[in-house]
Structures are given as structure tokens and as C-alpha cells.
Amino acid sequence: MALTPTRQRLLQLLADGEFHSGVELGEVLGTSRTAVWKALAGLDDLGLTIERVPRRGYRIPGGIDLHDVEAIRAALSASARALLDDLRVLAVVDSTNEALKATAGLLPGRGACCLAEWQTGGRGRLGRRWISPFASNLYLSVAWDFDGGIAVLEGLSLAVGVAVRRALLRLGVAGVQLKWPNDLLRDRAKLGGILVEVTGDPEGRCRAIVGIGINVAMPAAAAGAIGQPWRDLSDLGVRRDALAAAVLDQLLPLLREFPDRGFGGYRDEWEAAHVHGGRRVVISAGNQRVEGIARGVNERGALGLECAEGLRWFSGGEVSLREQG
Ligand code: BTN
């Protein structure tokens, strides 16, 4: 579903959570009160509650935290801004990762970033859905071109976890832990996830599309569809624009440095945040199920599992992990 310019403007007006009369909205939008009413009715599709009180007008209780692309740009460090070729916020998209696949002609050593208010087909790892309600969480993807093929990208998604954790810490979100291979946890429940997709020449120039989803203020109505324990940042009042800028500040330099540093440069920091180090876990890959004690990760981002046959190494891909007991 596309968001018409009238609806977008209406949302911007109502984002403050205050009452706005039908007359005021009609005047600002340059439309009749009937047209305003119709546009308001259409906002239900976004999962928003519009409250109407006679003689006071309309409001969205609690307001909404819409992205502002210029505010994100202004909050970026100068060095991150210099690494960004394009920054856009889409109101609605199937998936921000998908949106970047078609981006042509990235400048060497620079990335393109796409954010969305709402993903209608947000994707997680292992073909899962990523629940992406309107203006609630962070849905951010960055495309970056690499020479040297996919071999250069080994361990990238784990290194991105380190970058996102640093960004959260900068905003005062302490204690975030990392679950192999790509999850961010808060209080041992899922706060966010990373999905890296690769296009292009597997042995030459390829493009990594790094997709990051972080639960910021998950609405109760959407939370029912999440099939696992989850957590958000609503108790800390983190703003989505500030989070987007903090993530880009950490992520863009990482993408520039990654071909030289590899995952080895981030490994110790990853290990320090590893939620399952020394714990009994089960790794599932297709029909295979292996139990053991999770040990460290190696320079390539593979996880060592001490199991009946000795130490076995698993790399991300189609593998999932859960704690036993
Ligand atoms: C996971 O934990 O399974 C990975 C989730 C990744 C979600 C993000 S949201 C932005 C980007 N667009 C998508 O469709 N997925 C990623």
C-alpha cells in the first residue's frame, strides 16, 4: 500500500500526539474536512489509533516518532557522512534490503542507506518474517560494494553485531549481548537482528546489503506475531533518528575497514558480549541437530561447539542455535 502525500502530511501533523481540529487539518492540507476524514480513516491500515473527541479534534494518543531524513543526516559524525552516498527514508517498502538491491553505481568506498517507516515484507534469517510495524522500530539497510568476492565478507554479519552494540552503548543502552550468529539480546530476549545478503560476482565485485532491525517501541498489537521472547527500548526513550545516526556512525567505518581488518579485528569484542560462551546449546542445520558446549568464535566467525566427537566448527548460513534446558 502506498502512502499518499496527503496521508504523509497528516501523519506529520498528528505525530506530536496533540489534538488538531478537522478545520485546522483541512486548512494545512488544503482539502475539505470530508477529505481529511477519509484520509484519517485510511490511517487505520497502518495500525494507528486515531482518537476523535468532539470540539477538540483528532489525535494519535502518545504521538508517533516519525523519521526525519535531515535530522538523521545532521546527527551523523562528519566521518560517517563522508562515507554515505545516499540516505533515504521510505514510508512503505516490502524490505529495505530489497530496495537497495537495485541501487546502481555506488561510489567506491561509500555506501547507500535506506530506512523505512514500515516494511510490509520485512525479512529475517532462515526465511523468517521480520515484524515491522509502522514508525515503531528501526528498519535500516546499507549497501556497500566489495572487491575480492564473498570470501572477503566472512564474519561480516558478526562484526556488524559489534558495531550495533557499540552504537547502542553510545545511546546509553548497556548490557546488550550477542547471540551467534546475528542476534542482539537485551535481558536475554531478542532486541534486534542482522541479515546480510550478497549480490554480484561471488569471486569479484560483490555487494553486501546489511539489514539491521532493532525493536525500539514495539506496539502490543504487533508483538503477538513475534514467535520468541523479545525486548525493545521503550523504557529508555531512545529516538529512532538518533538510533539510525548512531548505527551509521559505527557501521560505515566498519564497512570501509572490513576488507583489511576482517572479523579478526572485532573478535575479542564479540567474545566479550557472547551470551552463550561456556553454555550448553543445540545447533540445528536442516535435519541435523548437534548438542554441545558453545565455545568461542574463530577468525572467520564460525562457532566452536564442544560435542561428543570433539570440537566442531559451524558457520552461520542456514544454521540456528538455541540454549538447552
Ligand atoms: C533476523 O534476526 O532474523 C534478522 C532480522 C533483520 C531485519 C532487518 S529490518 C531491515 C532489513 N530489511 C529486512 O527485510 N530485514 C532487515
Image (spheres, rainbow, N blue to C red):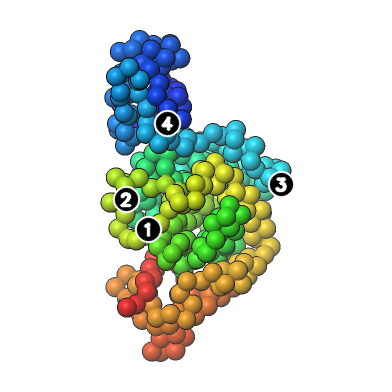
Q: Are marks 1 and 2 in contact (CB under 8 Å)?
A: yes
Q: Position of residue 56 (x, y in %)?
A: 35, 20
What residue is pinned by disc 1? 230
Q: Nearer the viewer, mark 3 or mark 2?
A: 2
Q: Which circle marks residue 79 in the picture? A: 3
Quadrant position of residue 21: top left
- Check disc 1 and give the amino acid type: Trp
Frontmost residue, 189 versus 174: 174
> Which callout, 3 or 4, points at the residue further toward the start of the chain?
4
Frontmost residue, 175 versus 154: 175
What residue is pinned by disc 2? 223
> Which callout, 4 or 2, points at the residue further toward the start of the chain?
4
Q: CA distance from mark 4 to mark 1?
A: 26 Å
What residue is pinned by disc 4? 17
Relative to 76, is 261 above or below?
below
Q: Position of residue 143 (x, y in %)?
A: 55, 47
> Which callout, 1 or 2, points at the residue further toward the start of the chain?
2
Q: Secondary structure at mark 2?
A: helix
Frontmost residue, 147 versus 135: 135
Residue displayed at 51% across by 71% down: 274
Residue displayed at 38% across by 47% down: 218
- Check disc 4 and give the amino acid type: Gly
> Which callout, 3 or 2, points at the residue further toward the start of the chain?
3
Disc 2 CB within 8 Å of nearest ligand 1 atom: no
Q: Secondary structure at mark 1?
A: loop
What is the total number of numbered labels drawn onto the structure image? 4
